[in-house]
Amino acid sequence: MKRKLQQYLLGSSMMILILGGCTKFDELFNFNNLDGLEGTSSWGIPIVNAKYSIGDLVQQFDSSGIMQVAPDGTISLVYSFEQEQIIKASDFLKVDNQVFSTPYVINPNRLSNSTSIEQHIFPLSFDNELMKIMSASIKTGTIVINVTNDMEQQYYCKLTTPNIKTSTGENLSITFSPTLLNYTINLANYTILPGDNNTGEFNVEVGVINNGITPTADHYDLNISMTLNNFSLKSVYAKIAPYEIPFNESFDFDLSSEQYGADITVYNPKLFISTKNSFLINGRIQLDTAAFSGDNEYSSIITNPPTNINIPISPINYQTDQIDAFSNININTEYNKIQLSGVAILNPNGFNAGVVRIDENSEISLKIKAEIPLDLKITNTFYADTIPFDLNDLLKDIPMADLKFIDTLAFRTVFESTLPINVYTQVLFLDTNTNTIIDSLFTNSKILYGSFNNSPVPSPPQMIQISGDRIENIKSCEKILFRIKLDTENRKVIFNTNQYLKASLGLKAVFNYNQLSIN
């Protein structure tokens, strides 16, 4: 995302001109076919001659499909963030592993020569803070029961619970004896029917057969322990507590460069939130932050945060809502991040929403799409590019050409634009050894007027002659610095793929051989 957004936003809003190197050709130097390269030795040598359209820039930079073009050619910058299963049923349909242990005291004074029975209660809990379970179908889980005692007589210990039903609908029941002290039950496909607060209980029945044996102790100890392991549910009917999932996304990009800079106002940005909700429970997304940020710089997209977006019930297809609380965006080349943060809330009304059903396939997926139409106001915008410029190389194919005999250099410039903004351009000669500007082609920046009715606006050909000391200054120049400045002059503009800028720069040299002596 980092470099892409830089290229897309500045590539479209500032019309980056990627100017090629010098080329030689032998046809008429005009603008009849600027998609190609042409020129004539009767006029001079072209240095730059090309057409740069928004459509070409879209094709060049848009490898990820972030730029979207409408049928009328208008362009939007669209970035989508998608998080599947931001809320999953597995977050609800699980019960923590638990261990329960309860000691019981058996009173031998109650024992007689016949069978004596005592009744006890063993508490049970299906711990889940998110739900008040009415009924649930068990997917996996085991219950391990261990019985220990110090009784001398024959006995049995029967455990029965109405809160766990077998696959045939009967109460879970198991009986222990001196030869069966532990038991493991696979609870798959069983059903739980907890009472209030997800609790349950086992009824413990202990029977002792004396067989005429006189008790030797004043009491007997009986201990029952249970362990719930790997407990998960396939489906549940329950009351659900509000469930929150925070999200905080930060996308890097970098608009900073010595090559260009700008202050840009983007009008009418849009944000779409798409959700797919198979929980059959309404939800809400609270968007706390949507902003551009950089070093000590911050520009919020939301007018009055936080903004709330409803999550409707939509088990099959994504449902999309548009946020209308967006403000215009003021960004500059100091920004290097886009931030989105907030919280997704399932069942914001909590237990008051009533009983709902959740199965193992329930989920909420989230898509966030930021759409920024390139409806812009730009100021203080510049772009600079360097072009190879070597007089020796340019003139090497001309007979008798020698730099020391140059009398005059003539540069010819022609431009044509359908951009809806004015462009100010300057051609500077750069000494690459000292990295300093030694001369400029235009006395003042040349104005290339914008097109405000979609018709091409040509800039008449202009001839600039350089002679004397100025030629001496640029003889050692190896690069031209092509600099443009764009300004919407406090207006909003809309770019589309059909808009373009044509630029042509040619060179003609006049030689003076009066001082040439031939022996």
Image (cartoon, rainbow, N blue to C red):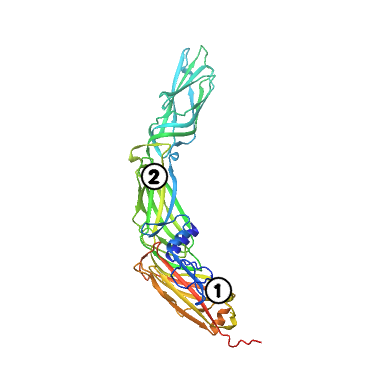
Kind of element beneath mark 2: strand
Instruction: Kindly identify the residue that appears in the image at 40 percent across and 48 percent down.
Output: 344
On the image, numbered disc 1 is attached to which residue?
Answer: 389
Question: Crowding at label 1, few (<14), some or many (≥20) Cα neighbours within 10 Å?
Answer: many
Q: For residue 291, which quarter of the picture?
A: bottom left
User: In the image, what residue type sits under mark 1?
Assistant: Phe
* Residue sitting farthest toward the right: 519
User: In the image, what residue type sits under mark 2?
Assistant: Lys
Where residue 142 appears, as percent x and y from the top left, is: 49, 29
Where residue 30 appears, as percent x and y from the top left, is: 45, 72
User: In this view of the protein, can residue 473 be seen by the observer?
Assistant: yes
Sequence-wise, which precedes: disc 1 or disc 2? 2
Quarter occupied by the C terminus: bottom right
On the image, numbered disc 2 is attached to which residue?
Answer: 276
Where residue 293 appears, as percent x and y from the top left, is: 45, 61
Kind of element beneath mark 1: loop
Instruction: Kindly identify the residue that appears in the image at 34 percent across and 56 percent down.
Output: 325
